[in-house]
Amino acid sequence: MTVRLTLLCAAARTERAVRFADAPLDERALRRVEAVAATLPQAGTVYTAPSRRCTGTAEALGWEAVTAQPALRDLDMGSWYGRTLDEIAATDASGLAGWLTDPEAAPHGGESVQQICDRVAAWLGALPSDAGRVLAVVEQAVARAAVVHALGAPRQAFWRIDVPPLSTVDLTGRDGRWNLRMAELPLGPRPPR
């Protein structure tokens, strides 16, 4: 049987300085979630990462019976938690450069890219083959790790995958093999010729 998994990246606060932190969604982000709610497929199983961003996104979608999955949590940012990328670059430029280029590096005392990729791959492998349609609200890093795993890409590809808030990643899985599925645009009225 095929598992059809849609990963929805959580909404993001609309403030300019993005921090490595978990914060509740603001009103603008909640309105954006409500605007995409009708575009998502129905699913028999719905998961969320345990962060406030992810659970807030799931709540704003009106999803019921959502199961929080610790394996879907964001990267552990260790000593960088609560700081902006600019702040880290100013105080630990070499550590940041190493972390962005070496998948095994964790200079912040948190989690490496390798570790999150392994964690997400294990979660994907543990999904039951008869799960059918599954939806999950996840952090951007989790979506990146899922794409890396599905494609069998090198871990260095993690940072080359752009995953905007409220974007989806569709994967189909069978017998331990995952495929990335690109979304098709809905057909509307044809323009006059």
Image (cartoon, rainbow, N blue to C red):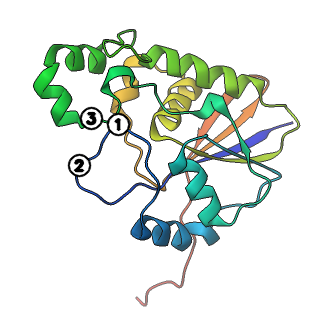
138 sits left or right of 62 in the view: left
Q: Is residue 9 visible to us here?
A: no
Tell me the element at label 2.
Answer: loop
The CA distance from mark 3 to mark 1 is 6 Å
Q: Position of residue 64 (x, y in %)?
A: 77, 59
Label 3 sits on a secondary structure element that is loop
Amino acid tagged 3: Arg
Q: Residue at x 50, y 83 (%)?
A: 190
Q: CA distance from mark 2 to mark 3?
A: 9 Å
Tell me if label 2 and label 3 are in contact, CB under 8 Å: no
Q: Which residue is mark 1?
A: 20
Q: Which residue is mark 3?
A: 83
Mark sitting earlier along the chain (2/3)? 2
- Could you tell me if the residues under marks 3 and 1 are in contact, i.e. CB atoms within 8 Å? yes
Q: Going by the image, does 90 lie left or right of 78?
A: left
Q: Amino acid at mark 1?
A: Phe
Pick the quarter of the image with the C terminus. Answer: bottom left
Q: Is residue 58 left or right of residue 105?
A: right
Expressed as whole percent of the image width and height from the top left, the position of residue 111 reads: 44, 18
Residue ID at (68%, 35%): 69
Specify the label residue 17 is tagged with: 2
